[in-house]
Image (cartoon, grey):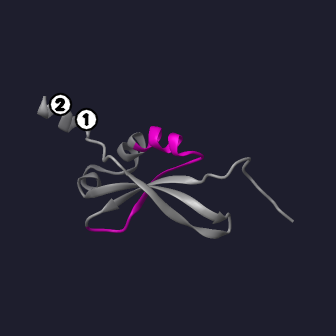
Amino acid sequence: MLVTTESKAQGWRAVAVFDDRADALLFVGRSSTQVRQMYAEAFAEVLDDEEREHVTTIQLQQWSGAPDAGRWVLKTTLKVPVPAAKLRVAA
């Protein structure tokens, strides 16, 4: 018997990779486009200032395999957002 709770799988995610700690999930979405549109906002909301300073890269990953048996596959890296405060100081 197949039981699904979602009409479509959430098959993409953005993950922050740090230089000094374990990776952190930023955003999960249905498409790479959705994740690309939302990861910067999630970066600002999910991580505090100290954590944002230690992010080295953000990975865009796609789920490969069955819902209960698969793995996340790196598709590309995304640009690490620049905090608004740093933009104001540089201007």
In magenta stretch: residue 46: no
In the displayed image of the protein, which residue is found farthest to the top? 91
The amino acid type found where label 1 is placed reads Ala
Q: Position of residue 63 (x, y in %)?
A: 57, 60
Quadrant in the picture for the N terminus:
bottom right
Tag count: 2
Marks 2 and 1, Cα distance to the nearest angstrom?
6 Å
Describe residue 66's horizontal placement relative to residue 80 as left or right.
right
> Is 47 or 39 nearer to us in this picture?
39
Quadrant in the picture for the C terminus:
top left
In magenta stretch: residue 25: yes
In the displayed image of the protein, which residue is found farthest to the right? 1
Mark 2 near mark 1, Cβ–Cβ under 8 Å?
yes
Q: Residue at x 32, y 46 (%)?
A: 79
The quadrant in which residue 44 appears is top left
Query: Which element carries disc 1, helix, strand or loop?
Result: helix
Q: Residue at x 40, y 40 (%)?
A: 41
Q: Position of residue 4 (x, y in %)?
A: 77, 56
**Which residue, given by chain and number where applicable, does mark 1 sit on?**
84
Q: Position of residue 43 (x, y in %)?
A: 37, 46
In the displayed image of the protein, which residue is found farthest to the front? 75
Q: Residue at x 34, y 61 (%)?
A: 17
**Which residue, given by chain and number where applicable, does mark 2 sit on?**
88
Q: Residue at x 57, y 45 (%)?
A: 31
Boundaries of the magenta span = 20-39
> Is 13 or 53 nearer to us in this picture?
13
